[in-house]
Image (spheres, grey):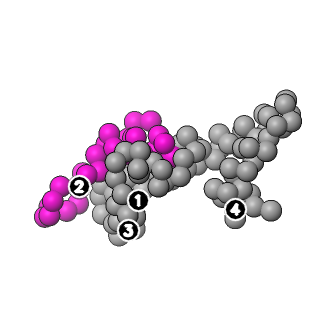
Amino acid sequence: MAIELAPPTFTNGAPTKLTNELAEKICGYIAQGNYASVACHAVGISPDTMMLWKRNAEQGVEPYLSFLLALKDAEAQAEVRLVGLVGEIATSEKQWAAAMTLLERRHPQRWGR
């Protein structure tokens, strides 16, 4: 998953830790189905840092807005993959419970009972 973040819209302060490489790693973990906090720890940042980036994205600040869009794509990819897996396993091996449980927990508003 190649990610090209937009250039920063700010010029003052310390440089951001958010790079194309870091965004790709985080989004890759998310696309695999990991929770955001796990992805953050796996790349060596605090989940609080990601929350700050999301708040900046909501205000239209780059490169955080580009990152948030990539993050949403990764979340969608994970859900699509899991839904496909549930369907595939349910029809072939009748062992769909693990994937379904993950969907129920990750997206209770759509997949909860």
Which residue has dot 3 on it? Answer: 55
Mark 3 vs mark 4, foreground winner is 4
Quarter of the rendering containing residue 8: bottom left
Q: Is residue 6 magenta?
A: yes
Q: Residue furthest top?
A: 92
Which residue has dot 1 on it? Answer: 47
* Badge 2 or badge 1: first in the primary sequence: 2
Which of the labelled discs sits on residue 16, or is there none? 2
Kindly report the distance in space between the C-alpha atoms of the residues bearing marks 3 and 1. 13 Å
Quarter of the rendering containing residue 53: bottom left
What kind of residue is marked 3?
Arg
Say what secondary structure mark 3 lies in.
helix
For image coordinates 34% across by 61% down, the residue present is: 49
Which residue has dot 4 on it? Answer: 108
Q: Is the residue under label 4 in contact with that under label 2 (CB below 8 Å)?
A: no
Which of the labelled discs sits on residue 113, or is there none? none
